[in-house]
Image (cartoon, helix red, strand yellow):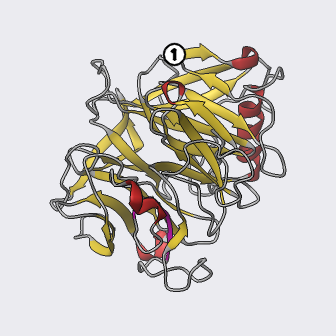
Amino acid sequence: MNVRPRYPRTTRHRAVAVLCAAALLGTAGCSFGPPEPDPAGQPPNLPTPSASASGGGGQQVAATVLAKGLRVPWGLAFLPDGGALVTERDSAKILQVGPESDTSGLKVTTVQTLDEVDAAGEGGLLGIAVSPTYDKDRSVFVYYSTEQDNRIARLTLGGEPTPIVTGIPRSGIHNGGRLGFGPDGFLYASTGDASDRGLSQDPKNLGGKILRITADGNPAPGNPVKDSPVWSLGHRNVQGFAWDADKRMYATEFGQNTWDEINLIQPGKNYGWPTVEGQAGGNNDRFTDPIVQWKTSDASCSGAAMVERVLVTACLRGQRLWLVELTANGGVLGQPSALLNGQYGRLRTVVAAPDGSVWLTTSNHDGRGNAKPEDDRILRLVFSGGGAGRS
């Protein structure tokens, strides 16, 4: 699956990250160590790598456990100080991870618990996004399930959430839930079909869609249909998306029994569910085909992160990272490369960090995994191919 999120980091860090990620797909090698200080201050005092694994082309990844003993960490978003906010799906807690550290890794603090959350099945406290102007407005956005619906709310840490979008269909499964600010400054949210297939093709229903809204929850200017928050439709259950440097959006899509997808998301396009799973084939111009599709046993990818022209996806059932290199035109270059196969169990969320590394969460306490004593964990990944020095 090919998806690249765009994160605020320096040009140098961005170049380092893409060279290392791209090396996973080729024969070139590179390595890099701790990041240099950025304008926000010193980098966090991170533990030393605790494990390493080989990937495609002889590439290796060093994995550091930043935090452990969590319960279904679902959403992850960085604060300006280098720490991260993490949601726990079932406990309805918002945690702050770092930037301070202790002997076991980064310090984990419970910021607050959202009482309105109804954590049943795949529902609960899901996505989280930090305002691009957080230093001024202190705003955080969350996606969560209640007894009646899924909703998006705005809050300041420690304060009561103010719902800005309600009425998103909810079910025991297929609740979507990813949140993220796009390069245009608007908030994007993914929703699921809530196990009611017909919702995905209903343009007036919020289920099975990608939404694009303002910070107040209103439909964003320039949406395909005026006064509608719908950006794209025909989705079964999107739980990951990201943008490349050219502002193209990519999303991971859970299939049913046959194909999981990565889609290049374009405004107003219909991605086919439930009529089509995977490529439509033939001359069907009603639906947009995925740019990558996998068997569900090999993928079931939730999170997605973009590192320059490499889309990194975190897979649940497939228990691996898929790395997809993209072309300058938004297509796929070569074959996707798998990494960390089965080493950490179910992988839920992957985010490009401001320092050029990648943060990854496991999801082995979600009722479908085999939890180890340290689960669930947050890992920091640094790719290296044996080259000397920094690239």
| Span of residues in magenta | 207-213
Image position of 209 (left or right of 266): left
Q: Position of residue 229 (x, y in %)?
A: 48, 75
Image position of 172 (left or right of 154): left
Q: Nearer the viewer, residue 336 or 312?
A: 336
Q: Can residue 388 be seen in this view?
A: yes
Magenta stretch encompasses residue 234: no
**Residue pictured at 46% horizontal, 50% vertical:** 236
Residue wearing tag 1: 51
Q: Position of residue 293 (x, y in %)?
A: 63, 36
Q: Quarter of the image containing the C terminus?
A: top right
Q: Which amino acid does label 1 sit on?
A: Ala
Image position of 305 (left or right of 191): right
Mark 1 is surrounded, within 10 Å at the Cα level, by few (under 14), some (14 to 19) or many (20 or more) other residues, namely: few
**Residue pictured at 16% horizontal, 60% vertical:** 147
Q: Nearer the viewer, residue 279 or 316?
A: 279
* Residue 191 figure quarter: bottom left
The number of discs equals 1
Q: In this view, does 211 lie above or below 55?
A: below
Tell me the element at label 1: strand
